[in-house]
Image (tube, rainbow, N blue to C red):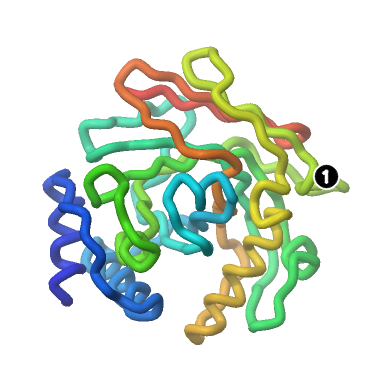
Amino acid sequence: MTELADRLVNAIRTRTALDPGASGLTLEAAYQVQDEVIAALGGRVEAAKLGLTSRAKQVQMKVDEPSYGWLLEGARLQPGALLNTGELIQPRVEPEIAFLTGQDLAGTSVTATHVLGATRAVMVAIDVLDSRYAGYNFTLPDVIADNASAARFAVGDPMPLDGINLRTVGCVFSKNGEVVATAAGAAVLDHPAGALAWFVRRLASRGQSLPSGSLVLAGALTAAVPVSPGDVVTVEIDRIGAVTLGVA
């Protein structure tokens, strides 16, 4: 295992942030480090997560293109479960749309139309981030190596697409009963399905594909917000549903 992968795994296990500092990795080398981190943590994937797919997130994190990572076994928070901040370093949460695929997706020419045709259901999601770099201060290769800051996630009930226009659905993101942000689905690469298409094409460039039955969080609709014990966050998305997460 490379030195950076070892340091990231240790940071996760000890809940100790690393000092920020550019690694100088290329994007492909960063994904190779990510692979090492995932393997060291057991390698059992529950969902994929896309990162930095909205302009708000790219501005917030000072990067200019998306990334992806993997949510591992045990990351999914079941309905009613609390997010245990004691297991994390510096948790933040953000609202997303999740896709459940019903067909395999593969190749470098996949489009949003292909993704929509292969979608079994969509659902409201809360993505819980936990950067292993102090202050969320990182370059794009560094956050890729850090598995796109993957930590935990929660999803609502699956909803068939049935004519839902994911580009225009409205999202309301609340914390402790106060609205902190609103957005439309178009905030994610102009269309959430377009983000998944980017993901499939990126996988194809590494000789991989997205199998049927995959759960994918399509990326943040708004900037992320930090959470502390006692907080309650809610994401509501038109025609798809809502999900609430308490924090301990």
Residue located at (37% from left, 74% from top): 31
Residue 50 picture location, percent across and down: 51, 57
Q: Residues within 10 Å of mark 1 (few under 14, many from 20)?
A: some
Residue located at (31% from left, 46% from top): 136
Mark 1 lies on residue: 164
Amino acid carrying mark 1 in the image? Ile
Which image quadrant: the N terminus?
bottom left
Residue 100 picture location, percent across and down: 63, 55
Element type at marker 1? loop
State left or right for residue 232 relative to residue 119: left
Residue located at (40% from left, 28% from top): 81
State left or right for residue 190 relative to residue 41: right
State left or right for residue 10 relative to residue 246: left
State left or right for residue 44 relative to residue 40: right
Residue 184 picture location, percent across and down: 72, 39
Residue located at (31% from left, 64% from top): 142
Comparing 196 with 65, the one in front is 65
Seen as rendered, the residue at the extreme right is 163
Q: Picture quarter containing residue 104?
A: bottom right
Residue 47 picture location, percent across and down: 48, 56
Comparing 79 with 194, the one in front is 194
Please count the marks in the image.
1
